[in-house]
Image: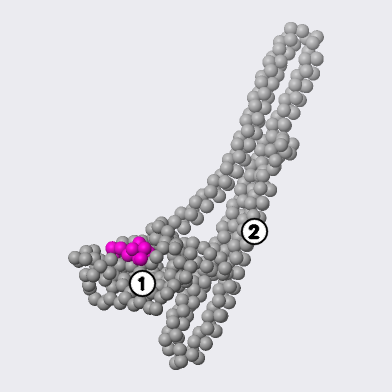
Amino acid sequence: HFKFFLFLSGPVTAPFGRFVVVERRGESTMNSSNVFSGEGGGPVQAGVGIFFQQEGDGSVVVKTIVSGGSAEREGSVRVGDQILSVDEHKVVGEPLSVLRGLILGSQGSFVKLTFQRKDMGEAHTFDVRLMRGSAEYLQSLTSSKTIEDEIDQLRLQLRQALSHCSQDRDELDRLRKMLQTERDQSQMRERELELLQQENARELAQLNENLRNAEGGRREAETQLHPLQQREADLAEELNRQKEKERLRKEYIEELKKRHEEEKVRLEGLFLKEQAGRREDQVARLGGESQLGRIQAELSRLRTLEQGRREREEEYKDRMQQELARLQDAVRTQDVVRSAVKEVEVKMARYTGEYLQYTQQLVPPEEALDDDNLFLA
């Protein structure tokens, strides 16, 4: 038993306008691409360019996507996708009349549809925001949409650039922290040296005082001159030893500074190499994604040819067999591209892990740092 409701495509004032519903026992379809006017010349109502079909279990799936409609222009919805909700309103198990009332709205307004797609045995959910309107209305917005798309593309590129800048900034902050740690340690050693110099200065002052006392004692008692001269020689020798120690400490500090600069240059070189590797991996991934997009476009074109083949089955039988062969080649190519993308992701993860492990090995334990065993991380 079939019921057909067909209304004229011209302007009407009936409450249903242009709308086609086909019902069969246990099955029905609905075209959401209709455009109609309310009674009394109210606002124009429109859909999103999708034919829905209700299955026997009550689920509603995409039957056909209308050419030039909002869904075809957006490109995310495919035939066979199951609709779950409209503007957060669940429609699973609801009749098509409820779905129609939720989707239809003022021409130019937007509606959010939630779909579920089964791909390679796995089901995933995604949202699509579509504009209500006929193909003619959407075509009239093409010129303005082109500029908006370019602006969106520029905004996307800007967000990507900001993301890369943020990653680079984090890496630079980490390097700055490492350099600041080394600088703090150097400053601490310099303070220790200053304390030693102050102590040496005090010892020198004390020695000078002792020398003056010795000179006074020499004047007072010439009999004690020799012991005082010996004492003065000992103090002078001690002073020379202290000066030699100070000279060795200064040389040690200069060596530490030199090692610090060499390690800094080496770390910067490793950082530049890592950035170059990431850029190469990103270029490879973008190439794989571009090829995958071309394959998906080819699959879409083959589906269109499949629909034409049903209309002209006898005339184009041989040509369709060739197209099916090309489709198989495209699917195999798609699998190869996916494998290549996975390999690139594994390689990036391995490089990142090796780099993190290498940077961790550069930092020595704090308890191993002393005056006799110093290491520049």
* Nearer the observer, 157 or 1: 1
- The residue at 55%/50% (across/down) is 171
- Sequence order check, earlier mark of 1 and 2: 1
Q: Label 1: which residue?
A: 31
- The residue at 48%/64% (across/down) is 116
Q: Identity of the amino acid at label 2?
A: Arg
Q: Position of residue 306 (x, y in %)?
A: 46, 82
| Of marks 1 and 2, the one in the foreground | 1
* Nearer the observer, 312 or 51: 51
Q: Position of residue 364 (x, y in %)?
A: 69, 43
Residue stretch rendered in magenta on the structure? 97-107
The answer to whether residue 148 of the structure is visible from this angle is no
Q: Is residue 18 left or right of residue 230?
A: left
How would you rate the neighbour count of disc 1 (Cα within 10 Å): few for under 14, some for 14-19, many for 20 or more? Answer: many
Q: Label 2: which residue?
A: 350
Q: Quadrant of the C terminus?
A: top right
Give the main secondary structure of the magenta stretch: helix
The answer to whether residue 33 of the structure is visible from this angle is yes
Helix, strand or loop under label 1:
strand
Quarter occupied by residue 5: bottom left
Q: Position of residue 249 (x, y in %)?
A: 69, 34
Residue farthest along the left direction in this orientation: 40
How would you rate the neighbour count of disc 2 (Cα within 10 Å): few for under 14, some for 14-19, many for 20 or more? Answer: few
* Nearer the observer, 106 or 377: 106
Helix, strand or loop under label 2:
helix
Instruction: Say if 179 sits above or below 268 in the image.
Output: above
Q: Magenta includes 65?
A: no
- The residue at 34%/71% (across/down) is 33
Q: Quadrant of the N terminus?
A: bottom left
Q: Identity of the amino acid at label 1?
A: Asn
